Image: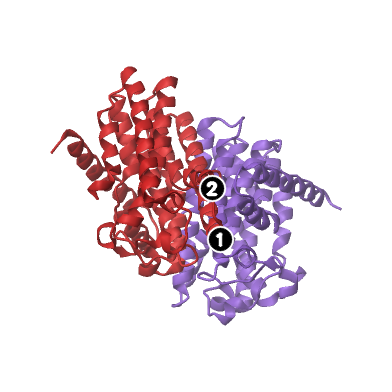
Chain colours: A red, B purple
Amino acid sequence: MNNFKIFEEEKITQFNQYIEEYLNKIQCHPFLKQAMLYSVKAGGKRIRPLLIFIILDALNTPISDDAYRVGSALELVHTYSLIHDDLPAMDNDDLRRGMPTNHKQFGEAIAILSGDALLTEAFKVITTSESLAPALKVKLIDELSDASGPRAMIDGQVGDILGEKTTYTLEQVQHVHEGKTGALLKYACLAGAQLANADKKQQELIVKYGELFGLAFQIYDDILDVVGSQEKLGKKVHKDLNENKNTYPNLLGLKGAQDKLDQVLFQIDDVLLKLEAQGTKIEFMKMILKYFKVGKI
Amino acid sequence: MNNFKIFEEEKITQFNQYIEEYLNKIQCHPFLKQAMLYSVKAGGKRIRPLLIFIILDALNTPISDDAYRVGSALELVHTYSLIHDDLPAMDNDDLRRGMPTNHKQFGEAIAILSGDALLTEAFKVITTSESLAPALKVKLIDELSDASGPRAMIDGQVGDILGEKTTYTLEQVQHVHEGKTGALLKYACLAGAQLANADKKQQELIVKYGELFGLAFQIYDDILDVVGSQEKLGKKVHKDLNENKNTYPNLLGLKGAQDKLDQVLFQIDDVLLKLEAQGTKIEFMKMILKYFKVGKI
């Protein structure tokens, strides 16, 4: 097993323990807690917290309790957005990560409320740190509300829903995806840089990396929907094509989308070279890009 | 017009301007903004921000921009909770404050998302204050997530929904209501005391006032549902009785609920006497209790 694989497995195992313990300690109705834990424990790649850990490692900063906290905040927001996205009034999905979606398991009312609860706790998990300086807590909360609220993620979701009735330009698709998916991934990189107290130049490059990572992620996700199988992905595929969604393959063709992905990965390499020249340890920031190798699915 | 009426009208007019301007400045999809503003502008009594203003007045503290901010945070949370509560999967209400509910006006998907957006902005409106100390911002955000998340408000909502299938004891009803309604009202008083930098003893008494106020509010609301009219309340009435909900009148009878309300108001008077003895200006804290005069509906 290579260094990155070891790092990834170790950190994600610890992260999963951390977030489950955090949720378990909340005093609330057991059915609500069960619904919250159900979706958080359903897993996924934990790519948002992993990005924080990778940035900290790249900046030679120990991965402290606070990194797990901010990673939890991100994963709570991400999980709530999936629960609400899956609702009948939204994407109407029955399956998520190979399991019944939250509303299929607990009913719609509890799914709505457990999503609301996870979103609210995302801010609490930052306020309750015993070591972060108050000013940094405020910054992290402010940026998290930017990334996850109407200024980014929810804006993207609204654009996505309303776009089903119309055909977007490539620019419009990119704007929707920057909000819907990109903002949280970018936040992960920004938060990592801030937790590591990176200098201004490093922080700018890391945020640029985060932006491009988010773009690659969405193009890749759109491609997966075309070439992946339900068995491997644990959710319905070919959904986007059926519904005439505004995706990269629908706009550019499958080959065009793959070219676009390669182009973004090339831009990421350029950012990584600049970071390396500044003394940043880019090994894991490079290794995580393996996710985007379409051939390997 | 008495002093309180003048104070109330002036502050609420300014508050309405403040919260609308805040929302108008958010850069997001116009349809999302329209949906957010629709429910926030629908009005209501603004009792949560008003409580903050009253506590500040009682403690001889000017009502600053920060008071409007924290009031806005509360009203954003309150409004989001109403939007989600009204959804078909929850209370399934078509009418709120005499107008179509958010999902009737904008569709369910946008209603869910605009609720999510308002909740997320509630934290942002606190982080962006230019005058509050970071440590106080963190405290106010921490307590707001306590009051509005799974530890209180959402816990109460879940208890309420699950309670429809069973009969609660008076104690259980009180627990549900403490979460569902009481926590935000108590938060308003606590936040007011903290913004005014009240001493420990004063803060304790003000929080006690907030707790009792919340209890009175819920008993009164339950009574209104029995004796009020749809025309005056702008929403469906007699809903609770029809659905065998766990309300005070259903548990204690109408007379019993009115007695209970009187008893709580008596306890509030006791707290007010203690506050007065400490030099707190209780005039408006007393005047706002006029809301609970059932005969005047």
- On screen, B78 above or below B72? below
Q: Can you tell which mark lies on residue A169?
A: 2
Where is mark 1, residue-wise? A165
Identity of the amino acid at label 2?
Thr
Left or right: A9 as drawn, with respect to A266: left
**Classed neighbour count for the residue bearing mark 1: other residues with Cα under 10 Å, few (<14), some (14–19), many (≥20):** few
Q: Quadrant of residue B248?
A: bottom right
Judged left or right of residue A39, residue B93 is: right
Q: Is residue B182 above or below residue B141?
A: below
Query: Is B287 drawn above or below residue B190 in the view shown?
Result: below
Mark 2: secondary structure: loop
Numbered marks: total? 2
Nearest the eye: A290 or A19? A290
Percent across and percent down for residue B183 are 53, 55
Q: Residue furthest left?
A: A1
In the picture, which quadrant includes the N terminus of chain A? top left
Using the image, name the chain to which the residue with label 2 belongs: A
